[in-house]
């Protein structure tokens, strides 16, 4: 049996007016009066006459609403046909493609400028330079002679581009400042594939990430149940250009291949932002290691991180010295 899902909200048509709203309210009120009278247990002597009068009032209100809706619909259809020759890609095209939606201004335009500035300053505070804490020395890595290797960066291959474009096709996200959604890049990848590969290869060879691809469009989403003048009542979302995300995926795939093939690879207990690894795998390893330590009568400790990057490897030596516990080892970062 399929699951019960909430019904979709009723969409507002563009030709609806205040007159129709008033007529609908009068029709609903007349229907409630008629239904309430019929549910009376103790009926007056002239109940039949009152019921007939209420029913006639309900029918009249319903007929008036229906005729007003038909007139408004016919008027809107005539206006649409008149604008068909002037603007073929406007309202008629959007109606046929089922893309007509009620427009609403962005939240940043409806808020006071001072409130927007306060919210953005609280969500993105200006931080100075933060020196990193002392860490344990990394393990020694044997030196490799790279004289015979090709110093050039391999060009962008079709495989890299196809994998990155496939992820754009699977997601339906809002476009960035350029206004091009991911589906547009998927459709244009066949024709623009060679030129895009050349552009990404040039960026890799020069070691440059275009500044325009780093520029995003900030969108604030209101959280329900929070005061409107509090920065915690808004969730920031930065929309980036899809071509920049495409370049990031190409770089991430090449970094992962280089670390896995050439090395040094990431730590064994590094689960964040890695293929075929998830939080479930981290919890499974933690449970197995914990059970093994308890069975042997040993000690163990966990590191619970609330930092924005919880996948950062835990500095085991530093935390061990700080806690004063010896003879134990970290399990993983959760």
Image (cartoon, rainbow, N blue to C red):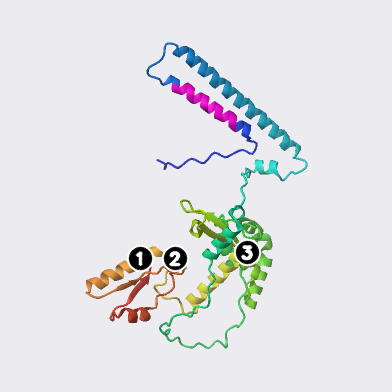
> Going 62% across and 64% down the picture, which residue do you hit?
243
Residue bearing mark 1: 283
Q: CA gap, disc 3 to disc 2?
A: 25 Å
Q: Which mark is residue 276?
A: 2
> Going 62% across and 62% down the picture, which residue do you hit?
241
Indicate yes or no whether the magenta region holds residue 182. no
Residue 126 location, quadrant: bottom right
Q: Are marks 2 and 1 in contact (CB under 8 Å)?
A: no
Mark closer to the chain start, 2 or 1 = 2
- Label 2: few (<14), some (14–19) or many (≥20) C-alpha neighbours in 10 Å: few
Residue bearing mark 3: 243
Q: Quadrant of the N terminus?
A: top left
Give 225 or 269, whichever is nearer the viewer. Answer: 225
> Residues in magenta?
21-36
Residue 228 lies left or right of residue 200; in this view the side is left
Mark closer to the chain start, 3 or 1 = 3
Q: Which element type, helix, strand or loop, lies under badge 1?
A: helix
């Amino acid at each position: 049996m399929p699951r019960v899902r909430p019904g979709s909200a009723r969409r507002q048509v563009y030709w609806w007016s205040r007159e129709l709203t008033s007529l609908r309210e009068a029709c609903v009120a007349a229907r409630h009066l008629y239904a309430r009278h019929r549910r009376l247990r103790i009926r007056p002597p002239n109940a039949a006459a009152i019921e007939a009068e209420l029913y006639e009032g309900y029918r009249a209100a319903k007929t008036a609403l229906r005729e007003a809706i038909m007139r408004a619909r016919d008027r809107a259809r005539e206006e649409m046909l008149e604008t068909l020759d002037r603007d073929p890609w406007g309202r008629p095209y959007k109606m046929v493609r089922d893309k007509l939606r009620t427009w609403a201004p962005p939240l940043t335009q409806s808020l006071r400028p001072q409130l927007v500035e306060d919210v953005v300053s609280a969500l993105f505070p200006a931080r100075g330079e933060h020196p990193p804490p002392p860490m344990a020395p990394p393990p020694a890595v044997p030196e490799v002679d790279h004289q015979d290797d090709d110093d050039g960066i391999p060009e962008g291959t079709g495989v890299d581009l196809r994998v990155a474009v496939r992820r754009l096709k699977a997601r339906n996200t809002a476009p960035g400042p350029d206004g091009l959604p991911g589906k547009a890049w998927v459709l244009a990848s066949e024709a623009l594939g060679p030129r895009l590969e050349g552009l990404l290869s040039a960026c890799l060879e020069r070691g440059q990430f275009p500044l325009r691809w780093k520029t995003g469009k900030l969108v604030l989403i209101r959280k329900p149940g929070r005061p409107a003048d509090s920065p915690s009542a808004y969730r920031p979302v930065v929309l980036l250009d899809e071509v920049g995300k495409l370049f990031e995926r190409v770089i991430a795939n090449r970094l992962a291949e280089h670390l896995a093939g050439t090395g040094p690879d990431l730590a064994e207990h590094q689960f964040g932002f890695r293929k075929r690894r998830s939080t479930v795998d981290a919890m499974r390893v933690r449970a197995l290691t914990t059970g093994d330590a308890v069975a042997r009568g040993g000690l163990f400790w966990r590191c619970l991180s609330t930092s924005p990057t919880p996948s950062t490897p835990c500095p085991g030596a530093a935390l061990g010295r700080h806690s004063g516990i010896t003879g134990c080892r970290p399990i993983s970062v959760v």
